[in-house]
Amino acid sequence: MAAYKFLTGEDVQIPVQLTENDETFVINVGATVTAVLRHGTTIISSIASCTDQTDWATSLVIVPFTDVETSAITVGSSPIFAILEIKIDDAGDISKWLATGIRVTKGVI
């Protein structure tokens, strides 16, 4: 995944290309895809439901967070780097991925 950055207080839709053995794959349209943004062991944004299935045929997931959710992220004067944890539940078959290098900067206005 290419580096992704956003400001607190804005709506974001983080694109994440998932792969297995360096290959894209098809995510079953009946699967449930969720994600959480965390920093260390602290969850810094609520669980997102990834319902945009536009690119699931190529395992591209769009993770949405609202402006209210990103406003709740505590960031000091220096940006933080967060981890996006993604889970696919396909009828009980659970798969997980981590996307690193998500830069979160405190929004000012």
Image: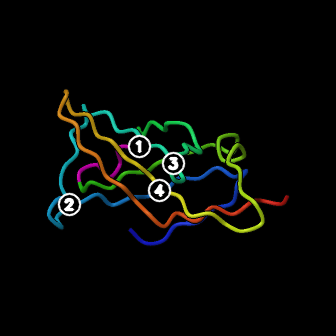
- The image quadrant of residue 53 is top left
What separation in Å lies between label 1 and label 3 (alpha carbons)? 18 Å
For badge 4, the amino acid type reads: Ile
Residue, disc 2: 24
Q: Which residue occupies the foreground of this view, 66 or 100? A: 100
Which mark sits nearer the N-terminus, 4 or 3?
3
What separation in Å lies between label 4 and label 3 (alpha carbons)? 6 Å
CB-based contact (under 8 Å), mark 4 and mark 3: yes
* Residue lying furthest top: 91
For badge 2, the amino acid type reads: Thr
Which mark sits nearer the N-terminus, 2 or 4?
2
Q: Residues within 10 Å of mark 3 (few under 14, many from 20)?
A: many
What separation in Å lies between label 1 and label 4 (alpha carbons)? 21 Å
> Could you say whether the residue bearing mark 1 is in a helix, strand or loop?
loop
Marker disc for residue 37: 3
In the image, residue 27 above or below residue 17: above
Which residue lies at the image location 58% right of the left edge and 65% below the top edge? 103
Which residue lies at the image location 75% right of the left edge and 60% below the top edge? 76
Residue range of the region highlighted in magenta in the rendering = 52-57
Q: Residues within 10 Å of mark 2 (few under 14, many from 20)?
A: some
Residue, disc 1: 52
